[in-house]
Amino acid sequence: MRGVMSIDDALALAEQADLDLVNVSPNAEPPVCKILDYGKFRYEQQKKEKMAKKNQHVTEIKEIRLSPSIEDHDVQVKAKTAIKFLQDGDKLKVSLRFRGRERDYTQLGFEVMKQFAEIVADYGVIEKEPKMEGRRMNMFMAPKKDK
């Protein structure tokens, strides 16, 4: 701690110590500078950034595909996979495709989606309700936040 001084004095001190004068926080009043080895300083900063990036989790959107005529056991199997995705912290897109005459029975699709959501309810919440988009019905789920 050298206190408040002019830039020329600070540069002279840095040269005398055979180090660099680094402006650590230029927005402060007065600006804060340190006398240190700039190469070592940058190396340590990059190391910190790399560790922070390594420790963060990127959420992905995983997709589960269903059909209106799916059997109960198949829904259970798909739900197990969905639970794994939600436990890993990923979001989930549940899509249901209507083919041919199935499009006339969209109510069956809503029932399958509702059944699927009830099975997975302990692990995820519905982010976007089931909605028809052309020949597909989509629903989005997000992992439940632990209290």
Image: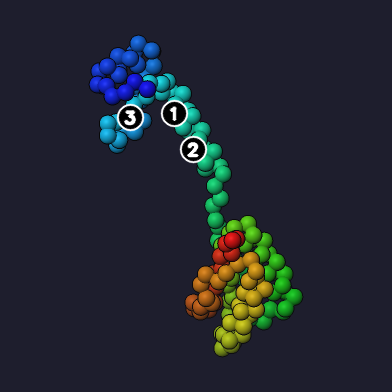
Instruction: Give the alpha-carbon distance from disc 1 to disc 3, as whole Å.
Output: 17 Å
**Residue at the image position 52 percent from the left and 76 percent from the top:** 129
Extreme-bottom residue of the structure: 104
**Image-quadrant location for residue 23:** top left
According to the image, label 3 marks what residue? 32
Q: Which sits earlier in the primary sequence, circle 3 or circle 2?
A: 3
> Marks 1 and 3: which is nearer the front?
3
Q: State the quadrant of the N terminus.
A: top left
Instruction: Give the alpha-carbon distance from disc 3 to disc 2, as whole Å.
Output: 22 Å
Would residue 38 be found to the left or right of residue 56 on screen? left
Would residue 8 be found to the left or right of residue 75 on screen? left
Q: Which sits earlier in the primary sequence, circle 2 or circle 1?
A: 1
Q: Amino acid at mark 3?
A: Val
Q: Nearer the viewer, residue 64 or 8?
A: 8
**Residue at the image position 61 percent from the left and 79 percent from the top:** 114
**Is residue 80 shown above or below 14?**
below
Classify mark 2: residues with Cα within 10 Å, few (<14), some (14-19) or many (20+).
Answer: few
**Image-quadrant location for residue 33:** top left
- Tag on residue 60? none
According to the image, label 1 marks what residue? 42
